[in-house]
Image (cartoon, rainbow, N blue to C red):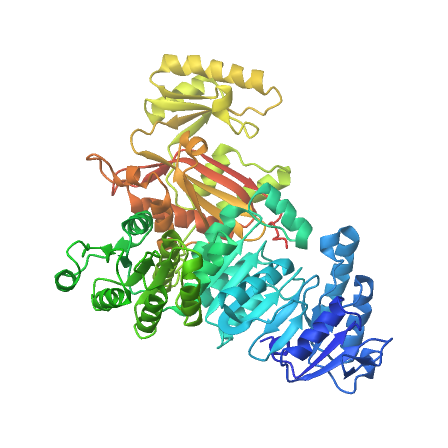
C-alpha cells in the first residue's frame, strides 16, 4: 500500500530550483544528501544541471517512468503537470504547492478540479499544501524539512507542515527516531485513514502518532483505527475543539474540525489514545517506543527524595493505576539491606545519600516482586548522588527485564549527561513524576483496550413500518419536528415502554381520559409547534380529580394561545403519572463527520444544569452502552447510595441499544431526546416519559 511513496526506485522533482532557499532546491538537496539510493530526475525548463544532476525541460523528456513525482510549481500550473503525469503513467504524486482550498473560494475550485483529474487518471496524491514525506528505511527525504530524523520505530503524520519541522528539530535533540514522517496538508486524496492502514502493515513501525484537525470520513476512520489499535498503539492530538480552534483549522487546511464530543466518542470506540498536547503526544510515544506494555496497573516507586515520591503517589491515586503492595519477601529483603531510616514500603525511599549500587539493589529486588507491574525510578541530584552511574545501572536493568521501567530525573544542568545516556539506551525519562505516571497510565489503558472483545451489535426485531409511515407523513407536511404523540409512537415501535396517554379536545374528553387512565395524571398541551411545553406553563403534574382536570384544561389552553397564538393546538394530552425511579436522559445528535451520536446522562431538569452526559457513535454494542452508564459522574446515584437499591442497569443498556438501532435504521433522524427515561429498581425496567424527534427530508450527508 502506497509503496511508491515510501520506497520509490525513481523520483521526479517538477519545479526543481538552482536557487538556494527555494522549496524546489531544498527538496532536491534533501533527496541527494540523505542517502536515497534511487534515481532522481530534476525538471526545470531553464536549467541543464542542478546540484550535479542532469535536469530535464519537461516531464515528457525523462527517459523512463518515475515511480514518484514531487510537484513544486505555482498552484495555477499544478493541473497541467498532473495531466503530464497521467501521460507518463505516473501513479503517485506529492503536491507541495499551496494555493488551494486553504486560500479561499478560488483555491477550493482549483482543488476540486485537481481531485477530479487524479481520480480520472487513478493517481494517488499526497497534499496539496504539504511539507512532503520522509521514510528513514529507504533514506527518502521527499520534503523541504531542514533535518533528516534518526531511524526509529515511530511513524508520525500531521496536517500541519510547520509542526512537522518543529518536531523534527525537537526529535534531533531528544534522540527520538522515526520510521516514517508524513505531512498531509489539505489531504485532498491521501488522508489519515490511508496512512493508518499503511502504518498498520509497516513492519518498521511500532507506534503511530498523528496530529489531526478533522477527518474526512468518520466511519472509515473508526474502522481503520479499531483494527490498527489492536496491533499497534495509535496516539493522536486532535485540535480545533474550540470555536476559535475550529475556525483556525478551517482557514489552515480547509478542514471541518468536527465536534469534540464526536471525536472523544470515536477515539474511545476505536482504541485511539488521545494526547491533549504535543508534549503529551511525545511523552506517550517514547514509553510505547522504548518499553514493553505493563501486565497490570500496579506501580512501584523508587526515590531518593520523599517529596517527589509523594507527588508521584498522588498522581497514581488520581489515575487508573494502583500503588503496588510489595510482597513480604521484598519488604524483608529491603529492610535487611537498606539503612534504618529508609522507607521499605511503596514508595521506597532509598534516602538522599543513595549511590548507584543502592539504586541497583532496590530495582533488582522490586523487579522480582510479582506484585509490581511497572517501576518509576525518581532521582534528585544531591551531594552524594552518582547521577551518570545510576543512569547506566537503570538502563542496563531496563534492557533485560520484561517489566515497564520509566525514570524521572528531576533537575537541569547536573542531569544532562545522565539524560543522554538514557536517551541513547531507550529508557524514557520525564522531567517531572506526574508526566511519567501519565505515560504509564496510557500504556495500561492501552492494554485494557487490546483485551477488549470486538463489538457485537445486537439487532432487535423491530416494527419499522409504523415508523416509516410516520416519517413519510412528516416529510410530506414539510415539517421537521414530530409531535410528542408521533415521537412516542416511533419509540414504542422500537420497544420502549411509554406511559398510557390519551389526547382530549375538550374538558369532557379530558375527564373521561383521566378516569380511564387512573388518577393522578399529567396534563400536557398537545401541539407540534410547542416543543418546550414547561416554558409556557403547558405541563401540570399530579392532577388528582375531575375538578382539577377541568380547571387545568382551560388554563393550559389559555396560556398556550397567549404565548404562541400561531401554534396548532390539538388539545391536551392526559398521561399516566409515573412515580418513583431515577430520571435519566437518552439523546441523539448528528455529527457531519461521524454520523449519529448517542447520549446518556442524568435526566429531567438536571441535564441542562449539570451536563453530566456521555456520548458514543452509533451503532453501539452492549459493552459500550454499559461503559456509557459508568462514565457519568452521577453513576453512584444510579448504583444506589445509603441503602438505596441499584436501578435496572440492564434496562438502560437495552434502551441505549434500541435507540442505536433506531437511528441506524432511519438515518434521517437528526436530533432526538427521550427525557426523562425513568429507570426503576433492578428488575423493574424503565419507562420513557417524553420524547422529541427531528428529521431531515433526506438522510444527512457527511462533509469533508
Which residue is depicted at the point 35% across and 45% down? 629
Which residue is depicted at the point 64% across and 45% down? 247
Q: Position of residue 324 (x, y in %)?
A: 23, 57
- Left or right: 246, with 325 as reference point: right
**Any part of residue 230 in sight:** no
Instruction: List the single residue furthest toward the front.
Output: 383
- Image quarter where the N terminus lies is bottom right
**Any part of residue 416 in sight:** yes
Which residue is depicted at the point 12% across and 61% down? 328
Q: Nearer the viewer, residue 487 or 195?
A: 195
- The part of the image, by quadrant, that contains residue 50 is bottom right
- Image quarter where the C terminus lies is bottom right
Q: Position of residue 664 (x, y in %)?
A: 49, 52
Q: Is residue 509 above or below residue 196?
A: above
- Left or right: 235, with 16 as reference point: left
Q: Is residue 311 above or below residue 611?
A: below
Instruction: List the single residue furthest toward the right.
Output: 46
Which residue is depicted at the point 67% across and 52% down? 252
- The part of the image, by quadrant, that contains residue 86 is bottom right
Q: Position of residue 547 (x, y in %)?
A: 37, 12
Q: Nearer the viewer, residue 107 or 663?
A: 107
Q: Nearer the viewer, residue 537 or 577?
A: 537
Q: Position of residue 267 (x, y in %)?
A: 47, 55
Q: Is residue 215 above or below residue 67?
A: above
How many numbered callouts? 0
Amino acid at each position: 500500500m502506497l509503496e511508491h511513496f515510501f520506497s520509490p526506485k525513481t523520483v521526479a522533482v517538477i519545479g526543481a530550483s538552482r536557487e538556494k532557499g527555494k522549496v524546489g532546491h531544498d527538496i532536491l538537496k534533501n533527496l541527494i544528501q540523505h542517502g536515497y539510493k534511487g534515481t532522481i530526475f530534476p525538471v526545470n525548463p531553464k536549467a541543464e544541471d542542478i546540484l550535479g544532476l542532469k535536469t530535464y525541460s519537461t516531464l515528457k523528456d525523462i527517459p523512463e517512468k518515475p515511480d514518484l513525482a514531487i510537484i513544486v510549481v505555482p498552484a495555477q500550473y499544478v493541473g497541467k503537470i498532473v495531466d503530464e503525469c497521467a501521460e507518463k503513467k505516473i501513479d503517485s504524486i506529492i503536491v507541495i504547492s499551496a494555493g488551494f482550498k486553504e486560500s479561499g473560494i478560488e483555491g477550493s475550485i482549483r482543488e476540486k478540479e485537481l481531485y477530479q483529474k487524479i481520480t480520472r487518471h487513478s493517481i494517488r496524491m499526497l497534499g496539496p499544501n504539504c511539507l512532503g514525506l520522509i521514510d528513514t528505511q529507504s533514506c527518502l527525504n521527499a520534503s523541504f524539512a531542514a533535518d533528516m530524523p534518526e531511524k526509529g520505530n515511530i511513524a508520525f503524520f500531521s496536517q500541519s507542515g510547520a509542526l512537522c519541522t518543529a518536531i523534527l528539530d525537537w526529535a534531533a535533540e531528544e534522540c527520538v527516531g522515526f520510521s516514517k514522517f508524513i505531512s498531509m496538508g489539505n489531504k485532498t486524496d491521501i488522508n489519515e485513514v490511508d496512512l493508518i492502514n499503511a502504518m498498520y502493515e509497516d513492519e518498521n513501525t511500532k507506534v503511530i502518532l498523528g496530529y489531526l484537525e478533522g477527518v474526512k470520513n468518520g466511519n472509515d476512520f473508526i474502522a481503520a483505527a479499531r483494527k490498527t489499535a489492536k496491533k499497534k498503539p495509535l496516539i493522536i492530538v486532535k485540535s480545533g475543539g474550540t470555536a476559535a480552534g475550529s475556525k483556525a483549522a478551517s482557514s489552515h487546511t480547509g478542514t471541518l474540525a468536527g465536534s469534540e464530543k464526536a471525536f472523544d466518542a470515536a477515539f474511545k470506540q476505536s482504541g485511539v489514545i488521545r494526547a491533549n498536547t504535543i508534549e503529551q503526544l511525545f511523552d506517550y510515544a517514547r514509553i510505547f517506543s522504548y518499553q514493553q506494555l505493563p501486565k497490570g496497573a500496579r506501580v512501584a516507586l523508587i526515590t531518593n527524595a520523599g517529596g517527589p515520591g509523594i507527588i508521584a503517589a498522588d498522581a497514581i491515586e488520581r489515575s487508573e493505576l494502583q500503588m503496588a503492595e510489595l510482597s513480604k519477601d521484598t519488604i524483608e529483603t529491603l529492610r535487611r539491606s537498606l539503612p534504618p531510616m529508609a522507607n521499605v514500603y511503596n514508595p521506597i525511599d532509598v534516602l538522599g545519600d543513595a549511590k548507584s549500587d543502592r539504586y541497583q539493589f532496590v530495582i533488582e529486588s522490586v523487579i522480582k516482586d510479582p506484585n509490581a507491574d511497572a517501576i518509576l525510578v525518581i532521582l534528585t541530584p544531591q551531594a552524594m548522588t552518582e547521577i551518570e552511574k545510576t543512569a547506566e545501572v537503570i538502563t542496563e536493568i531496563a534492557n533485560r527485564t520484561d517489566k515497564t521501567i520509566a525514570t524521572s530525573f528531576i533537575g537541569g544542568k547536573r542531569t544532562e549527561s545522565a539524560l543522554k545516556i538514557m536517551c541513547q539506551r531507550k529508557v524514557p525519562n520525564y522531567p517531572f513524576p506526574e508526566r511519567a505516571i501519565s505515560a504509564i497510565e496510557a500504556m495500561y489503558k492501552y492494554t485494557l483496550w487490546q483485551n477488549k472483545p470486538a463489538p457485537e451489535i445486537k439487532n432487535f426485531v423491530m416494527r419499522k413500518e409504523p415508523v416509516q409511515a410516520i416519517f413519510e407523513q412528516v416529510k410530506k407536511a414539510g415539517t421537521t419536528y414530530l409531535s410528542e404523540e408521533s415521537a412516542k409512537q416511533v419509540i414504542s415501535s422500537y420497544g420502549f415502554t411509554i406511559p398510557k396517554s390519551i389526547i382530549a379536545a375538550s374538558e369532557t374528553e379530558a375527564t373521561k381520559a383521566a378516569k380511564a387512565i387512573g388518577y393522578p395524571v399529567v396534563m400536557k398541551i398537545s401541539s407540534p409547534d410547542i416543543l418546550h411545553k414547561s416554558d409556557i406553563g403547558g405541563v401540570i403534574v399530579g392532577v388528582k380529580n375531575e375538578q382539577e382536570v377541568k380547571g387545568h384544561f382551560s388554563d393550559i389552553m389559555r396560556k398556550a394561545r397567549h404565548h404562541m397564538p400561531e401554534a396548532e393546538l390539538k388539545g391536551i394530552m392526559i398521561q399516566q403519572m409515573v412515580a418513583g425511579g431515577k430520571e435519566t436522559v437518552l439523546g441523539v445528535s448528528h455529527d457531519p463527520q461521524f454520523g449519529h451520536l448517542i447520549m446518556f446522562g442524568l435526566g429531567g431538569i438536571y441535564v441542562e444544569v449539570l451536563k453530566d452526559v456521555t456520548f458514543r457513535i452509533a451503532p453501539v454494542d452492549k459493552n459500550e452502552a454499559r461503559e456509557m452508564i459508568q462514565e457519568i459522574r452521577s453513576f453512584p446515584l444510579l448504583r444506589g447510595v445509603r441503602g438505596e437499591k441499584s436501578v435496572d442497569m440492564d434496562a438502560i443498556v437495552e434502551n441505549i441499544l434500541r435507540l442505536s438501532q433506531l437511528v441506524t435504521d432511519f438515518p434521517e433522524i437528526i436530533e432526538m431526546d427521550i427525557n426523562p427515561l425513568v429507570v426503576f429498581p433492578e428488575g423493574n425496567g424503565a419507562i420513557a416519559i417524553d420524547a422529541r424527534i427531528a428529521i431531515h427530508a433526506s438522510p444527512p450527508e457527511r462533509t469533508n
